[in-house]
Image (spheres, rainbow, N blue to C red):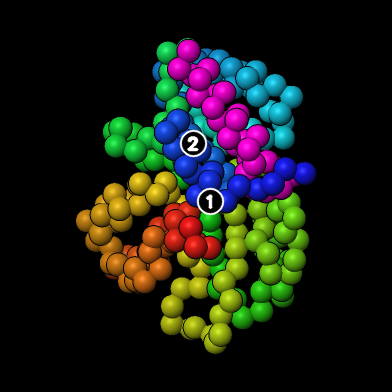
Amino acid sequence: MEQKLSRREASDAVSHLGWRYLLGALRTSVPVGSLARAVEVAASAVAVCGDDADRHLRVDLRPDRVVLTLQSLDLAGLTARDVDLAHRISAAMHEGGLRAEPEIGTGASRSVQILEIAIDALDIAAIRPFWKAVLGYADEAGADGPEDPVIDPVGQGPAIWFQQMDQPRSQRNRIHFDICVPHDEASLRIEAALAAGGRLLSASRAPAFWVLADIEGNEACVTTWQGRDGS
């Protein structure tokens, strides 16, 4: 079995190619002008991945972009194989007159990102089966413990993770969004949220995450790979 890469190893290996590390995956976007062109881009990416496509590559096609995600799905993490595939895909896009980019500072509607929903709980093991069942979710590879996150098995919905509470909180929200953005997008996203009327509640764990809230106190965290596990 291939060894998982650290967050920093994965990020440093592909950032110059236009990919970004997000929650154990590599993600990039390829701007296109039509859905037909998007299909061609997807086919090119699958072709260069060859036999590794099914176990590593996920593709989201839209008329204006193709979002490509790489991950060693059986490990729910990244290996040298994923980095190699990112190099191959980026080279293929360049040869086709296209570019793989994280869509930061390009005028795009937003950068690449991954959304998670966090649920605060006093007894995670007791509520996890409900959320897994009601959403039709599944365990992530290698993470089937009673307090582990649950994921959409077809990759369309956000992951759900559970945050341990030490006492009930009746006067505040107990579900919040985690928006994992490229490390070089975080400051721009936070500035935009504050300009839109938000408040910064805490930056004590930055750059791992910043806690923000709307004017009624509903919270969201902007997160990055940095500042975790000594990275």
Identified at 30% across, 67% down, the residue is: 200
Disc 1 marks which amino acid?
Arg
- Compared to residue 207, the image places residue 4 above or below, namely above
Quadrant in the rendering for residue 190:
bottom left
In the image, residue 64 lies at what x, y percent? 43, 25
Q: What element carries label 2?
A: helix
Q: Main secondary structure of the magenta part?
A: helix
Give the residue displayed 33% in from the left and 71% down from the top: 201
Q: Is residue 151 left or right of residue 227?
A: right
Q: Is residue 61 something that shows in the picture?
A: no
Determine whether 125 is above or below 115 in the image.
below
Q: What element carries label 1?
A: helix
Q: Does the magenta stretch include residue 43?
A: no
Name which quarter of the figure residue 78 lies in.
top right
The magenta region covers 70-95
Q: Which residue is drawn at 29% across and 49% down?
A: 188
Magenta residue check for 74 = yes
Marks 1 and 2, Cα distance to the nearest angstrom? Answer: 11 Å
> Which residue does the numbered mark 1 point to in the structure image?
7
- Residue 195 at what x, y percent from top left? 22, 56
x 42%, y 23%: residue? 99
Residue 92 drawn above or below residue 60: above
Residue labelled with disc 2: 14
* Badge count: 2
Residue type indicated by callout 2? Val
Residue 128 in picture, x, y percent from top left: 69, 68
Between residue 112 and residue 81, name the one nearer to us.
81
